[in-house]
């Protein structure tokens, strides 16, 4: 039984944007194309199309919205969102302007979603506004973006959807064999209402087999359908672009809820709504949980919440993985799709949410690369150390590119946009994660530098020993050159014989010096120690020889 509240509130307009981060498998070093370029080449046999210069075909109203979105952000943020400045005097032929770091693909074959939140509840239909794939240059990060909307829905139904929809796989099954925590069924519908793909949360053996064989759960069928021709990393299906899951089954999401008189919501209802992604609808409210006691200070942004009849009454609930914008359905500015909060929700606030999760996904990707490099390191194997050094240097270069191209502490001069950006980052732990990755890279770089210095010191020691002991061969050949053995007038084969014997003797001395370089170095240190008597030094040398 849903315990959201006794009063039945109606959500006049509901809009939800799923933003699912995925980690792409890096391409081979000899592949000249980037991942989005390879995906573009695969689009001919799929419903995906490249979204390029979308403003050219948009109406004046939409172009006006996008212009406002553009001006919200600082110039250095615009550089990777929209590309660098164009003009005949801004760049030289040797320094052409860079395009936007974001590459977007869209599909229009999926027009609706039919979902049953849980067994016993009626199905709910949503209009599918957008389904996009978002690539970022210089990263192995990809986002699946899915925007849904619906009208006149009970708040309890919306709460069920916020909790259950947007899960990549089931976390378990009940006695009836149905997946728990996820929706009962989800179906993507085409333009004629036909079913394009359905969820398979009840296919227990599919998920169990994947975890047993591959140590990773598979994604549900309706999500796999949307991602095609991308292929899951452990799948046996052939595909050029393969992906991993970065986080758990929860997909980040933002939602817009226009409710009649949101001031009538109780604190418990606000709490349940703000924690809808993690608090089960039937679970009693954990009153002493720190997230509950500090809910308003940690997760609420009330710049536009006056709690008065005259308004405004618009509240942001930011939990890191989620952001919900709740407002009064009777306020014209809140529901305005062109200039109001609804337009800003779809553009300004979504973009800030996207940037914050790009940061988190990229940092988690770096963390996994470092863990994988350490896991494969064998300090007893020189080849393993050489590969480890290459991987760390590549990761360090990628981290530098990420830092200087994407990582910023301020994105906008608008107080609401900047405050939300900081709140997202704080609740996601982005800054702490960034410092952790930076320290790990620094530690590994120090290890590699120290290891290189140790190897160079060892090489210098060996060369010093070899130089010292090959003086014997030098003196020997020099002594031969003094005509102690006068074979200048001997037959050629006799002279070659002496040369060959001398060469073998010199080579033998050289090889012995190399093999025993460390021991010989110890001998040289003992013999050269003037603080001890000569007899004591020779005794130490003899004892060292006997012990070894």
Image (cartoon, rainbow, N blue to C red):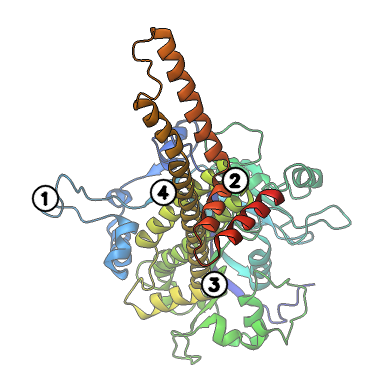
Side of 86 relative to 178 (left or right)? left
Locate the N terminus by quadrant. bottom right
Q: Secondary structure at mark 3?
A: loop
Question: In the image, residue 347 lies at what x, y percent?
Answer: 40, 64
How many residues crowd mark 2 within 10 Å: few (<14), some (14–19), many (20+)? many
Q: Secondary structure at mark 4?
A: strand
Instruction: Answer with the quarter of the image where residue 273 lies.
Output: bottom right
Q: Earlier in the sequence, mark 2 or mark 1?
A: 1
Instruction: Answer with the quarter of the image where residue 515 lies.
Output: top right
Instruction: Work out whether residue 184 can be spotted.
Output: yes
Task: For marks 2 and 1, give the CA distance.
Answer: 48 Å
In this rendering, which labeled residue sits more in front, label 3 or label 2? 3
Mark 4 = which residue? Answer: 104
Question: In the image, residue 238 lies at what x, y percent?
Answer: 60, 31
Task: For marks 3 and 2, give the CA distance.
Answer: 37 Å
Q: Secondary structure at mark 2?
A: strand
Mark 2 = which residue? Answer: 189
- Residue at 37% in and 18% down: 486
Mark 3 = which residue? Answer: 429
Along the line of sight, the residue nearer the viewer: 233 or 450: 450
In this rendering, which labeled residue sits more in front, label 2 or label 1? 1
Mark 1 = which residue? Answer: 88
Question: In the image, residue 72 lies at what x, y percent?
Answer: 31, 70
How many residues crowd mark 4 within 10 Å: few (<14), some (14–19), many (20+)? many
């Amino acid at each position: 039984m849903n315990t959201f509240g006794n009063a039945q509130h109606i959500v006049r307009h509901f809009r939800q944007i799923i933003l699912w981060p995925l980690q792409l498998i890096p391409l081979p070093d000899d592949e000249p194309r980037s991942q989005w370029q390879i995906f573009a080449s695969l689009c001919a046999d799929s419903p995906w199309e490249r979204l390029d210069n979308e403003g050219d075909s948009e109406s004046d109203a939409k172009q006006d919205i996008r212009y406002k979105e553009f001006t919200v952000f600082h110039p250095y943020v615009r550089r990777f969102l929209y590309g660098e400045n164009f003009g005949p005097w801004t760049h030289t032929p040797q320094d052409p302007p860079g395009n936007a770091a974001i590459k977007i693909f869209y599909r229009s074959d999926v027009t609706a979603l039919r979902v049953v939140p849980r067994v016993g509840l009626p199905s709910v239909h949503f209009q599918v506004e957008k389904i996009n794939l978002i690539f970022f240059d210089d990263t192995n990060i990809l986002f699946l973006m899915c925007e849904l909307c619906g009208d006149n829905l009970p708040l309890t139904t919306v709460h069920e959807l916020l909790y259950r929809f947007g899960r990549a796989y089931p976390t378990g099954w009940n006695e009836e064999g149905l997946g728990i925590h996820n929706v009962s069924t989800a179906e993507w519908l085409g333009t004629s209402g036909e079913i394009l793909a359905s969820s398979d949360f009840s296919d227990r053996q599919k998920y169990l087999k994947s975890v047993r064989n591959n140590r990773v759960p598979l994604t549900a069928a309706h999500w796999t359908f949307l991602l095609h021709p991308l292929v899951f990393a452990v799948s046996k299906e052939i595909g050029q672009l393969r992906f991993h899951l970065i986080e758990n089954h929860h997909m980040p999401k933002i939602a817009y809820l226009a409710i009649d008189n949101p001031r009538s919501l109780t604190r418990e209802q606000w709490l349940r709504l703000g924690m809808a992604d993690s608090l089960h609808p039937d679970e009693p409210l954990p009153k002493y949980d720190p997230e509950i006691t500090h809910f308003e200070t940690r997760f609420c942004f009330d710049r536009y919440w006056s709690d008065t009849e005259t308004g405004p009454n618009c509240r942001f609930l930011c939990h890191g993985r989620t952001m919900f914008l709740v407002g009064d359905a009777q306020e014209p500015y809140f529901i305005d799709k062109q200039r109001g909060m609804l337009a800003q929700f779809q553009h300004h606030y979504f973009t800030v949410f996207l940037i914050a999760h790009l940061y988190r996904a990229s940092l988690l990707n770096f963390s996994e690369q470092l863990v994988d490099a350490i896991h494969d390191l064998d300090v007893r194997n020189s080849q393993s150390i050489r590969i480890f050094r290459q991987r760390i240097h590549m990761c360090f270069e990628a981290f530098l590119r990420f830092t200087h191209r994407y990582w910023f502490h301020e994105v906008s001069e608008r107080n609401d946009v900047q405050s939300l950006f900081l709140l997202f980052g704080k609740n996601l732990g982005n800054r702490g994660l960034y410092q952790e990755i930076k320290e790990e890279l620094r530690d590994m770089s120090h290890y590699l530098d120290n290891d290189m210095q140790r190897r160079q010191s060892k090489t210098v020691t060996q060369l010093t020993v070899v130089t010292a002991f090959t003086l014997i061969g030098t003196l020997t050949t020099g002594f031969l050159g003094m005509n102690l053995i006068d074979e200048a007038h001997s037959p050629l084969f006799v002279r070659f014989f002496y040369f060959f014997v001398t060469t073998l003797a010199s080579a033998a001395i050289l090889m012995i010096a190399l093999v025993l370089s460390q021991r010989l170095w110890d001998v040289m240190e003992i013999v050269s120690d003037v603080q001890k008597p000569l007899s004591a030094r020779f005794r130490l040398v003899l004892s060292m020889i006997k012990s070894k």
